[in-house]
Amino acid sequence: MFEDLCRSLPENPVLGGIVLIDKFLSTGNVTSSYSALVEAYTCVLTYLRLHGLFDKVVSAEMRQGENLKDRDPILRWLQQARGNLAAKCENELADYGARSYGSFFDRQAPYEFVESDLTRVQQLITELRELIAKTNELEEGHKERLLMRLEALQREMHRRMSSLDRCWGFIIEAGLVLGQFGENVKPLTDRIVEMAKVFRRAQVSSEVFPTGRQLPPAVSGALEGAEE
């Protein structure tokens, strides 16, 4: 039932797991059907084991076997697995940008922001923090993770930086989360895309920027079509 979905996942296993669960949770004929939920649960469990993520993602409480004979416990299990993927695998997610773009960039060369771009990123962080706190579309867990990433990003933003890994890590995580909600979160998505353009300008000043095809669709499409 889910073969096509599994074949289209990102190469990075952490991102792939997040995308897989997000697809299941956002598909009505999965969440409304007990048999489809059982298949989704089995698919995710198999995916985590095959990619060596089971021990990081499936907590002791989750292994105790909550009654999975009803829809709600399976939904809770999938939601918790998704949250644990993002939270407990943060290092792998933050490093994804470096692994994806490593062949394109000289990792030793510092990246430099022009003053106006650095100021704008700080403004965007403030605006995003307010919008995330106010939106009704995101669950509290998603809000907390995005706000924590924003705080970490704000602490690391400087005129000259030796790495943009955390910058792209935030863009990827935010794009994956917000991509589920489309036009309902457009003010948030617009600011994420603008922030990604600033990071791209800093990146392209050192090397040729690769295509955005491995970024979340909510971000990559806007980047590829944007004119500088």
Image (tube, helix red, strand yellow):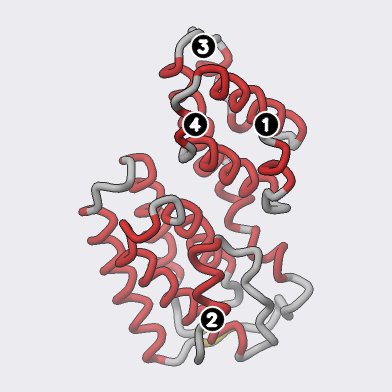
Q: Nearer the viewer, mark 1 or mark 3?
A: 1
Q: Amino acid at mark 1?
A: Met
> Can you say which quadrant of the picture contains the N terminus?
top right
Figure quadrant of residue 149: bottom left
Give the alpha-carbon distance from disc 1 to disc 4, as whole Å.
12 Å
Q: Nearer the viewer, mark 3 or mark 2?
A: 2
Q: Position of residue 142 (x, y in %)?
A: 38, 45
Give the alpha-carbon distance from disc 2 to disc 4, as whole Å.
33 Å
Count neighbours of disc 3 (C-alpha within 10 A) and say few if under 14, some if 14 to 19, many if 20 or more. Answer: some
Q: Amino acid at mark 3?
A: Leu
Q: Residue at x 68, y 53 (%)?
A: 10
Q: Find disc 2 in the rendering and name its residue.
A: 225
- Left or right side of 88 for 156: left
Q: Find disc 4 in the rendering and name its residue.
A: 29
Give the alpha-carbon distance from disc 1 to disc 2, as whole Å.
33 Å
Instruction: Say the numbered circle drawn on residue 1.
Output: 1
Give the alpha-carbon distance from disc 4 to disc 3, as whole Å.
18 Å
Q: Amino acid at mark 2?
A: Gly
Inspect this view and state whether residue 165 appears.
yes
Instruction: Identify the mark nearer the N-term, 2 or 4.
Output: 4
Q: Nearer the viewer, residue 226 or 177?
A: 226
Secondary structure beneath dot 1 equals loop
Inspect this view and state whether residue 83 appears.
no
Q: Residue at x 55, y 66 (%)?
A: 168
Instruction: Identify the mark nearer the N-term, 4 or 3.
Output: 4
Q: Are the residues flagged by discs 4 and 3 in contact, CB closer than 8 Å?
A: no
